[in-house]
Amino acid sequence: MNLKYKWMVVLAASLLLLTACVGQSSQTPSLSPSVAPTALQPPMKTESSPQPSSEPQTLTVMTHDSFAASEEVIAEFERLNNTKVNFLLSGDTGSALNRAVLTKASPLADVFYGVDNTFLSRALREDIFEPYSSPALADIPDAYKLDAENRALPVDFGDVCINYDKAYFEQKGLIIPQRLQDLIKPEYKGLLVVENPATSSPGLAFLLATIADFGPENYLDFWKALRANDVAVVNDWSTAYYTNFSGSSGKGQQPLVVSYGSSPVAELIFASEPLSEPPTASIVDKNTCFRQIEFVGILKGTAKRALAEKWVDFMLGVSFQEDIPLQMFVYPVNSQAKLPEEFVKFAQIPAEPAMLPIDLIDQNREQWITAWDEAVLR
Amino acid sequence: MTFGLRRRENGALGAVSQRAGLPVWLWAAPLLFLGLFFFYPLSAVLRLAGEAALAEGLKGAPWSRLGGALWFTFWQACVSTLLTLLAGLPAAFVFARYRFRGKRLLSALLTIPFILPTVVAAAGFNALLGPRGWLNGLLMSAFGLNYPPVRIINTVSAILLAHIFYNTSVVIRVVGSVWAQLDNRLEQAARSLGASSWRTFLEVTLPLLRPSVLAASLLVFLFDFTSFGVVLLLGGPRFTTLEVEIYLQTMQFLNLPFSGLLSVLQLACTLSITTLYLWLNRRQPVPLSPRLSPDGLWSVRRWRQRLLVGGVIVGITFLLLLPLVALALRSFLVISPEGDLSLTLAYYRELFINRRQTFFYVPPMVALRNSLAYGAATVTISLALGLLAASALNRRGRFERWMDAILMLPLGTSAVTLGLGFLVVFTRPPVDLRSSPWLVPIAHSLVALPFVVRTIQPVLASIPSALRQAAAVLGASPWRVRREIDWPIATRAALAGAIFSFTISLGEFGATSFLARPEYPTLPVAIFRFLAQPGDLNYGQAMAMASLLMFICGLSVLVIENIERK
């Protein structure tokens, strides 16, 4: 590397730095609540200047591909805060988090939503979040708060459960399996399709359910028995559900699939002809489902801390929380939020879902997946 | 960093242009493009991986799986390429030499498989060959079986079949466009000198086609070599290739040192394969006058010709078009829980309604507009750069041979790694992936450029230098020679290249999904959103959107091909 080249790099770097600084200073004064705080919008800290700005600011939210919300709910936030919200949809749960981790030196967004309890420890270990004790946490039961420092704040929860094709079991006169242990019985030979935990988030959750149920010493025996019982393994949820599962529109071959506890309600809502009840249901006995809790956090290094706080408050507030079930088919954590009618009627929330400590998951994830891979696939 | 890159490029170019007497601008734009959008992001990721490796070492690297993955990657790519050639060459011959009804339509339809997102292709294969698909249903009712006799999904056969499905049109187009312009009189001369038709083919036609067959093989091989979706979705979890392993290590295990190592390994393989191709292709191509308007198309008269043309059409239809038909049909069918079928337009109607008032609702016309806009931008970028590069490659010095290999690299590079590079590097204006809509067509152009170069370059190389010299002697400037001799001859190939870039862009999902702003979704992105939620309407709408994508693809190809005739 010669001297001239070095100079160019230094020059380029200082130029970039300069533009970054200019960008920051022009953004800071516009952090202003242009509208009086409402019940939804807990009072802001007084750090922001009072003048309303006419030019809307932008807030970038990095999240996974499954993120969804109503237009009017997003519009409400944008209007109240004179803000344009940009979403960066960054792949599935694992990919989105890893993209955030790999870009933490110069973060792509101000807020990250969608890390779940299976990946939470990685996010905390990589130190991508700034702590924020949102006043909205008051309405959220402590059971969902897995980070004592409030770097990651709970937003919603859902369960990965086995769905079954009601018609199939009725026609064959088969009893529906109750516990995971039942799945290795000969009458269920070749009836279950699961996702590869290395490539799929529900696949990983189901593996964790078996570890919680049978213990880290014995879960592989269960999987070996399941393999002998002709379990089908595919790489992603869409293939499992639409290609293999007989209860979906794909009309596949297996009447049992690892999916979500709320999938039957979705089948009802997205039916092409109105149905009186869902064609599928979930198995929700003790330890058959794995509980996933999703979190939001303010990304370290954001230049828009105050606005990011408002977004977090907003996501935990009643209006967004009540929007969650019909958009993302998971449940709100805010105890004040009411569930939509279809969910009240047909949702099956397991009373005793499987869970594992987040640190234990973080320490063993790779080893568990590798061992599973050896036992089930090779 | 870009300053540095640009400077070095200029240095290298300076030396070469002096030696070869080439204007620098021919190389400047393609090199700048590759430097900024390929080498810069790639080196940023590899540096990140290198730093991580220095800090934590190569711990947790599944070495035991590496050998198997490497072997399987090569094996499936070789077999897939051979099978694709076997399926594509007879079809290329029939399309290049015979006149038959519905030829243009069939040729447009055969392009469609190339653009199908893998999830959709998987659904098509399943509807056709799956345990409850048409074929098994037919066989079960015909022979009274109570189990599906054909088990192909999640086997090696599914991977090979899907690769043939995707790439046969590459062979048909790359070889066919050269074959159609071959001078018939050479073969006629051989025949009149007493050579059998077989000997004429082996000793006259094949040597003339050799560069294009090699070019098609290289494209298909690299495509299969870095195949990701097909292996993941149709092969299932028992098969892993280098690309799948890179994805797992990067996106699931966050093992950057190991994934970086794998990326370098993959890059080295791509470079060796391309070098092998260049070595095989080192002989000067036989110069011949390409025919500007292909005359002498044969009509199908004798029974042997009928058998050949009919056989090829039927075979290729079964292989490439039946999965598409299965998909399109599914978008018009409702299957009741009892298994009864009824026709419906509900899925298409529903596409236009934002029933859930969701923020990410994609109006079909908006997705269509975005897809077409990205496609048009990709064609413009890759065709402009491709024409420059192809005509610069026409002089075969050592530098050109290197450049030839380098131009192919993006096709054989991990999309996961390169995509990560975009995220790491393009985070500030003027190239900010959060605000610039240009990164999508740029990413598409990286993949399309090798196709454009490989379609145009063999054609340019086959132009006899006597033709250029004659023009020069008559007083034409080098620029005018290019404009009046090279480019008219290259137009047909350029159109084939345009079709490739357009269809690559139309069907691409991986890069689009995280480079495109959610406000500018494309048709494949919309299909994925539907397939990510349960429910009959979601599935049906995905099929309807996929049918729309197939229709638009076929239509666009017809339109582009029509330009040629005018």
Image (cartoon, coloured by chain):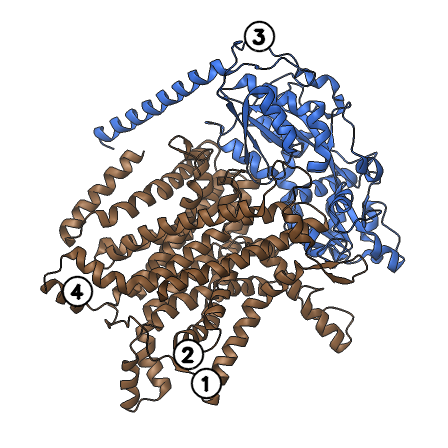
> Which of the chains is brown?
B
Q: Residues within 10 Å of mark 4 (few under 14, many from 20)?
A: some
Q: Earlier in the sequence, mark 1 or mark 4?
A: 1
List the residue tagged with mark 1: B305
Measure how far apart labels 2 and 1 are at the Cα level.
9 Å
The amino acid beneath tag 3 is Thr
List the residue tagged with mark 2: B98
Image height check: is B169 above or below B510?
A: below
Q: Position of residue A51 (x, y in %)?
A: 51, 10
Numbered disc 3: what chain? A
Same chain for marks 4 and 2? yes
Tell whether label 1 touches label 2 (CB within 8 Å).
yes
Q: Position of residue B465 (x, y in %)?
A: 18, 67
Q: Nearer the viewer, residue B303 or A159?
A: B303
**Residue at image coords 39%, 18%:** A21
Q: Residues within 10 Å of mark 2 (few under 14, many from 20)?
A: some
Image height check: is B308 above or below A358?
A: below
Visual hue assigned to chain A: blue
Tell whether label 3 touches label 2 (CB within 8 Å).
no
Question: At numbered mark 2, what does the secondary structure look like: helix, strand or loop?
Answer: strand
Q: Residues within 10 Å of mark 3 (few under 14, many from 20)?
A: few
Numbered disc 1: what chain? B
**Marking on residue B468:** 4
